[in-house]
Image (cartoon, rainbow, N blue to C red):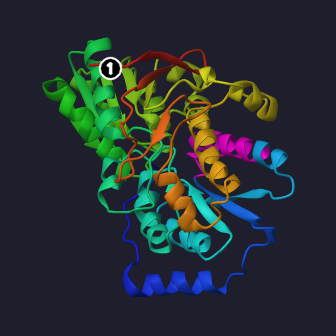
């Protein structure tokens, strides 16, 4: 998600840097035959304008660790934050910091696609297993990264679903398509465009960091479009939507999971965001299974946001492996790659194909609607 595409250092120099950093670290403490004081990294935008999407994921993971540590008081695991602010330019340094700490044996994330493109080659060189709860760019599974695992469906599913919502639910006769310059936004919008086809009466792009959209707003209004698909993140989507409303545009704003966060609601304002649609290749976290919802509310005094239940389940996969004595990076990598169980919160069967995609890939995509200042599950999007 939040990202410009950046070039990542690679080759022999990077491999040497990683190896040297790892060798300098101390060996984890052990209790009997069980390695203790190990760490799981959480990698994503924990501050900045898009943190609203990632914070619930971090909370879900932290809840899983709290419960694990309560049951393993003599051999606890620590969750370590790697706050990328969603910026792929920050990702390599953070990734190198993680692989250089021998106690970090797994990464939950990266949360966004661009930072995944920047960080995952470093994790691959170090053999550090990762599971992303939310990075949906399809091409991430084409890099040959053995450590890469995705815990949700990708934009080959989500992008078309957004287009289908505009076409079949809204029954719009004219649609406008806008995408930002991120790896996520570009891919998502391209997939939606394939479905919308001749309904599209105009397209345009925005840049990360843009806040003024006068020219684009004029184009949208002049096009006569009654629906707009936006591929990108809240940081730009929120002021864009506010300016559309201020100019009198009454159409429906449809985006992907990149806008499915509390900041999109709060920053845009209840009146302007009302009726906005945000898709997600996930279930409704407020209806997660087991005790997850009650446990989450008890800890955070809030309802779980999208992907909180996913992150909880994924963190528990790593923790289950640690509890079973898989305490090295290599052992955890083998554990995840061979995993085949149902998550207690999501009900999803977590089994990965060789390319890191769920096998079989989930096909459910939900539309969430902004209703009276909150995201409410609207309906499952089908063809």
Q: What percent of the width, then of the height, locates residue 300?
A: 77, 34
- At horizontal 62% and vertical 22% (from top left) the residue drawn is 286
- Locate residue 372: give its quadrant: top right
Tell whether 126 sits left or right of 48.
left
- Locate residue 361: give its quadrant: top left
Residue at disc 1, secondary structure: helix
Give the vertical position of 167 relative to 308 (above or below): above
Q: 111 or 218: which is nearer to us?
A: 111
Q: If the image is split into quadrants, where does the C terminus sit?
A: top left
- Locate residue 365: give its quadrant: top left
Q: What percent of the width, then of the height, locates residue 282?
A: 48, 30
- At horizontal 54% and vertical 23% (from top left) the residue drawn is 284
For disc 1, the neighbor class at 10 Å (few under 14, some 14 to 19, many from 20) is many
Tell whether 150 sits left or right of 317.
left
The answer to whether residue 281 shows anywhere in this view is yes
Q: What percent of the width, then of the height, locates residue 318?
A: 61, 52
Q: 196 or 23: which is nearer to us?
A: 23
Does the magenta run of residues contain 59? yes
The answer to whether residue 110 shows anywhere in this view is no
Find disc 1 in the rendering and name its residue.
Answer: 165
Does the magenta run of residues contain 110? no
User: Which contiguous range is marked in magenta?
Assistant: 45-66
What secondary structure do most residues of the magenta stretch adopt? Answer: helix
Q: 106 or 9: which is nearer to us?
A: 106
């Amino acid at each position: 998600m939040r990202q410009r595409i950046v070039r990542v250092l690679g080759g022999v120099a990077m491999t040497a840097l990683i190896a040297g950093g790892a060798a300098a670290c101390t060996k984890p403490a052990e209790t009997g035959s069980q390695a203790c004081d190990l760490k799981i990294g959480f990698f994503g935008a924990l501050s900045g304008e898009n943190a609203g999407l990632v914070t619930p994921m971090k909370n879900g993971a932290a809840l899983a660790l709290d419960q694990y540590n309560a049951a393993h008081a003599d051999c606890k695991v620590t969750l370590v934050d790697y706050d990328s602010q969603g910026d792929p330019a920050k990702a390599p340094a953070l990734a190198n910091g993680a692989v250089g700490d021998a106690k970090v044996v797994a990464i939950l994330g990266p949360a966004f696609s661009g930072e995944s493109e920047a960080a995952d080659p470093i994790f691959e060189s170090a053999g550090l297993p990762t599971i992303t709860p939310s990075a949906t760019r399809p091409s991430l599974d084409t890099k040959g990264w053995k450590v890469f695992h995705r815990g949700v469906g990708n934009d080959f599913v989500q992008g078309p679903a957004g287009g289908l919502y505009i076409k079949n639910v809204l029954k719009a006769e004219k649609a406008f398509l806008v995408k930002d310059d991120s790896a996520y936004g570009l891919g998502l919008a391209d997939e939606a465009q394939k479905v919308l086809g001749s309904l599209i009466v105009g397209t345009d792009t925005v840049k990360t960091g843009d806040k003024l959209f006068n020219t684009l707003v004029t184009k949208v209004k002049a096009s006569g479009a009654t629906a707009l698909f936006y591929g990108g993140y809240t940081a730009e989507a929120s002021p864009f939507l506010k300016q559309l409303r201020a100019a009198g545009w009454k159409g429906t704003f449809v985006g992907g999971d990149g806008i499915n966060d509390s900041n999109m609601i709060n920053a845009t304002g209840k009146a302007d965001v009302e009726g906005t649609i945000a898709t997600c290749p996930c279930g409704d976290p407020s209806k997660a299974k087991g005790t997850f919802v009650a446990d989450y509310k008890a800890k955070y005094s809030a309802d779980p946001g999208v992907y909180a239940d996913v992150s909880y389940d994924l963190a528990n996969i790593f923790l289950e492996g640690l509890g079973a004595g898989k305490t090295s990076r290599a052992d955890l990598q083998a554990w995840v790659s061979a995993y085949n169980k149902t998550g207690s919160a999501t009900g999803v069967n977590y089994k990965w194909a060789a390319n890191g995609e769920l096998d079989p890939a989930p096909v459910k995509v939900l539309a969430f609607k902004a209703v009276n200042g909150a995201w409410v599950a609207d309906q499952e999007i089908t063809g």
